[in-house]
Image (cartoon, rainbow, N blue to C red):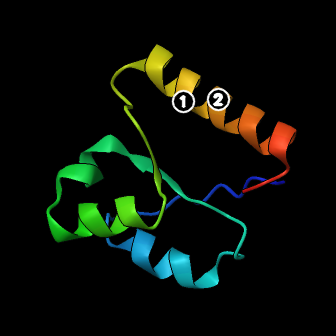
Amino acid sequence: PYVIVCNHQASLDLLGMVEVIPDRCVPIAKKELLYLGTLGWACWLCGVIFIDRHRREDAIDVISQTARTMRHENVR
């Protein structure tokens, strides 16, 4: 397992990044994208992990849980 960090400038950049990241990667996006209608649904169905950037502790918990799952199960 590995982590790729990308600094994208707009919400739609996420769609372009999906084309270039390896198959075993899952993007992490800000939770606000979940509420952008069709784009939010598409991200959710593709397995994007959403974090709440305004609640620091919750974001850390989500990322920590994801990292533990990646290590223990050796999955994306």
Q: Nearer the viewer, residue 18 or 41?
A: 41
Q: Position of residue 18 (x, y in %)?
A: 53, 76
For the residues labelled 2 and 1, say whether their Cβ atoms are less than 8 Å apart.
yes
Q: Nearer the viewer, residue 47 or 50?
A: 47
Q: For mark 1, what is the residue?
A: 62
Q: Residue at x 28, y 53 (%)?
A: 33
In this view, 11 is above or below 61? below
Does residue 5 appear left or right of residue 14 in this picture? Answer: right
Local crowd at mark 2 within 10 Å, few (<14), some, or many (≥20)?
few
Q: Residue at x 76, y 32 (%)?
A: 68
Q: Position of residue 47 (x, y in %)?
A: 49, 59
Local crowd at mark 1 within 10 Å, few (<14), some, or many (≥20)?
some
Q: Secondary structure at mark 1?
A: helix
Q: Residue at x 26, y 63 (%)?
A: 41
Looking at the rendered image, the quarter that the C terminus falls into is bottom right
Q: Secondary structure at mark 2?
A: helix
Q: Position of residue 5 (x, y in %)?
A: 65, 55
Q: Please, what is the three-letter code of the amino acid marked with disc 2?
A: Gln
Does residue 68 appear left or right of residue 16 in this picture? Answer: right
Looking at the rendered image, the quarter that the N terminus falls into is bottom right
Q: Please, what is the three-letter code of the amino acid marked with disc 1?
A: Val
Q: Residue 36: which quarter of the image?
A: bottom left
Q: Residue 40: which quarter of the image?
A: bottom left
Per the rendering, the mark at residue 65 is: 2
